[in-house]
Image (cartoon, rainbow, N blue to C red):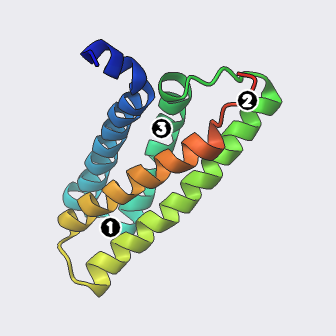
Amino acid sequence: MAVRDLLKKYQELIAYGIVGVLTTLLNLVVYFVLTSWLGVHYILSDIIAWVICFVFSFVTNKLYVFKSATWTFNALLKEVSKFFTSSVFTGIVDVGLLYAMVDLMKINGTVSKLTDNVVIIILNYILRKLWVFKKKAEE
C-alpha cells in the first residue's frame, strides 16, 4: 500500500494525533507556567489547563478531525453538550489520576502529568469518535 493510500485511510486518526499533540502541549505549557512560574497549586493548574484546552479541542476536533458539518443551533448545542460531558468525565479522570500518582504514589509531578495525558488522549478519541461526533448511517 502506497504512503498516499495510508495517509488517506488513516487521515482522521492522523489529524486526531496532531490535534491531540497540540492540545497536550497546550495543556502542559499552561500547567507548567501556572505551577512552576506562578506557584498555583497543581490541581487548580490542571483544572485551568483543562478549561483552556476544552475550547481549543472542541473547535479543532469539530473542524479538522471529525469534520462535523452540524451548524444548526440544536445540532451544535447537542454536540457541545456531548463534548462537554465527555470532557468533564475525562477531566475528572485526569485530576483523579494526577492526584493518585502525585499524592498517593509519590510519583514526580512531571512524570505523572505526562503519563496521565497518554491515558486522556486515548479515552478522548474513543468518546469523541463513538459518541460526540458519531456519523449517522446516511452520511
Indicate the quadrant containing the C terminus: top left, top right, bottom left or bottom right. Answer: top right
Q: Compare residues 7 and 99 and report the one nearer the observer.
A: 7
**Is residue 51 in sight in this rendering?**
no
Q: Where is residue 38 in the image (x, y as percent from the top left)?
A: 25, 57
At 57% across and 58% down in the image, what residue appears?
A: 88
Whether tag 1 and tag 3 are in contact, CB under 8 A, the answer is no
Amino acid of disc 3: Ser
Q: Position of residue 90 (x, y in %)?
A: 50, 59
**Disc 2 versus disc 1: distance between alpha carbons?**
43 Å
Q: Residue furthest bottom?
A: 104
At 20% across and 55% down in the image, what residue appears?
A: 37
Residue mark closest to the camera, 1 vs 3: 3
Residue mark closest to the camera, 2 vs 1: 2
Local crowd size for mark 2, using a 10 Å CA cut-off: few (<14), some (14–19), many (≥20)? few
Quadrant location of residue 6? top left
Q: How many numbered discs sit on the rendered protein?
A: 3
**Disc 3 versus disc 2: distance between alpha carbons?**
25 Å
Q: Where is residue 48 in the image (x, y as percent from the top left)?
A: 43, 54
Precedes in sequence: disc 3 or disc 2 = 3
**Disc 1 versus disc 3: distance between alpha carbons?**
21 Å
Precedes in sequence: disc 1 or disc 3 = 1
Whether tag 3 and tag 2 are in contact, CB under 8 A, the answer is no
Disc sitting over residue 42 in the figure: 1
Disc sitting over residue 137 in the figure: 2
Q: Compare residues 42 and 101 and report the one nearer the observer.
A: 101
Pointer 3: what residue?
Answer: 57
